[in-house]
Amino acid sequence: MPLRNTRQLLVAAGDTVTGASAELPPWVGRHRRCSRRGLAAAGTAHKQDSLLRLCQERHFISGGAPSHTSLLQGGHSLGPLGVELRRNLLSQWWNSVVLHREQVLAIDTALQLPNPSIAPEAPLLAICTQHLLGLPPQQRGTCLGGPVGKCGVLRHELLYGALMEYVPSMELLNKKLPFGLAEIGKCFHPIPEVANEGTIPPRIGERTVASLVWFISPKSSGQWQDYWLRHRLQWWQKFAQSPSGFGCREIEQEGQGGKISVIQYEFPWGRETIETLCSMDDSALLQMHSGSSTKLQARDGRKWVVPHVLWVSGDLDRGLLAYLSDALQQTEGPPVRGRYQQREVLKLHPTLAPIKVAVDMGKGPTGELRLVCQGLSTELREHGVYVWPGYQESLQGSLEQLYTKYDQMGVLFTVLVSEATLENGLLQARSRDTALKETVHVSKLKDFLLTYIAAATHL
């Protein structure tokens, strides 16, 4: 007798059923739990494979077949769509941290740092880099070594440059706290798997880092730590389809003061840190600038203090990968020959989507349709809308193949110019998120798209 009917009979006979253990042998519950774990693991592996395949096929990543390890280590370059996605992400970070905030200055510091064996601030520099690189203890003493030699080393983080810029920046802002220094730039690190092989020269991985160094009064350091942690977590969640994939936690420091919090994303293969907030006392500046501490003092109301430092450092390449993972969805597409198909869609937030509109041709005279497409594309580009010129492609497949391709590229709208456009000015605009097609007059398309994109920035 099926298990479901057994339960129904027990209930009908008046037996008290309080749970699975009241009616079933213990091994049944264990078997069901194991099955669920197996299904979950299979689903996770499938999403990971789909993510890596899509990143390569749709040219978000370049440089051979990727793995999640090689992506996290910075062993791959970005393809054209990845570059555009990162550009949009950088723009949103800059707007949030610098453009829409007072008392934050932009800086651009050197890629090369002093040799740690002769620089007096080397101990501080080593401590700063260890936390974000996540190096094991045996590598921490040599984490700043590298191929540059006696001249110096390639930077691992952006903190050093910001601390060096503290005094002139403080004077520019009339020595008033709080204030911050923001920078986006490349940072470099050895790739551990290759570096540990001894005779083989270590490969250098790179990542795009967005850094804010916030100088604050000692009495308000805890409040600012909480504020920035909440602000940064909300910022990451703002652009996500599933905000719960982003979370934060505190990590322990071995024998050191201050406080470190991390913002992480739940990838298919596990949690990875995408941003770190590190709270330090005044020793950060005192070690960096030797001599009298008077020149380091800034105004906190009527008091003069050497400020504490809050350092916010985000790995935007990992952030880009997190948003790709978050956006990848499997949905049910329209029926084909009576059977429903799985539809793979990259539902990137509209402000992050690399391509806003794809302009393509339907049925009709090719030459005339291409001229209309070119005119539309030029008009949209002049208003800052990134357009994919699908009408220039020589190989044309079915409409469903076309929509599948653009869905996997994260294109917000597919605009189809057809013979009807030549007759009455009407064209079709298909939405990536709903797969619905809307008829729009060619003269109104620009306003339609610009209104949608502007509204999306407030989501």
Image (cartoon, rainbow, N blue to C red):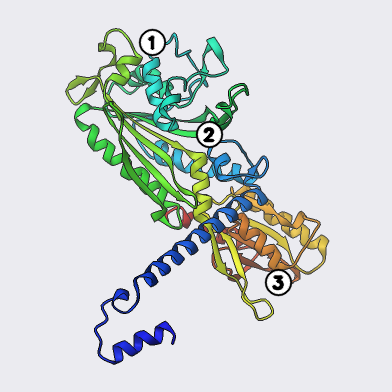
Q: Residue at x 30, y 74 (%)?
A: 21
Horizontal and vertical percent position of residue 330: 55, 64
Residue 184 or residue 105, whichever sits in front:
184
Instruction: Say what secondary structure mark 2 lies in.
Output: strand
Q: Which residue is mark 2?
A: 207
Q: Earlier in the sequence, mark 1 or mark 2?
A: 1
Where's residue 130, x and y in %?
41, 27
What amino acid is found at the position of numbered circle 2 in the picture? Arg
Q: Where does the C terminus fall, quadrant-wise?
A: bottom left
**Mark found first going from the N terminus, 1 or 3:** 1
Residue 362, horizontal then vertical, whole percent: 74, 67
Left or right, 3 with respect to 410, comes to left
C-alpha distance separating marks 2 and 3: 51 Å
Residue found 26% across the figure and 27% down from its top = 257
Q: How many marks?
A: 3
- Mark 1, other Cα within 10 Å: few <14 / some 14–19 / many ≥20: some
Q: Secondary structure at mark 3?
A: helix
Marks 1 and 3, how far apart at CA: 74 Å
**Type of amino acid under label 1:** Pro
The three-letter code of the residue at mark 3 reads Asn
Question: Which residue occupies 62% across, 44% down?
Answer: 66
Residue under pointer 3 = 424
| Residue on which disc 1 sits | 120
Q: Is residue 298 left or right of residue 59?
A: left
Q: Callout 2: few (<14), some (14-19), or many (20+) C-alpha neighbours within 10 Å? A: many
Mark 1 or mark 3, which is nearer to you?
A: 1
Q: CA distance from mark 1 to mark 2?
A: 27 Å
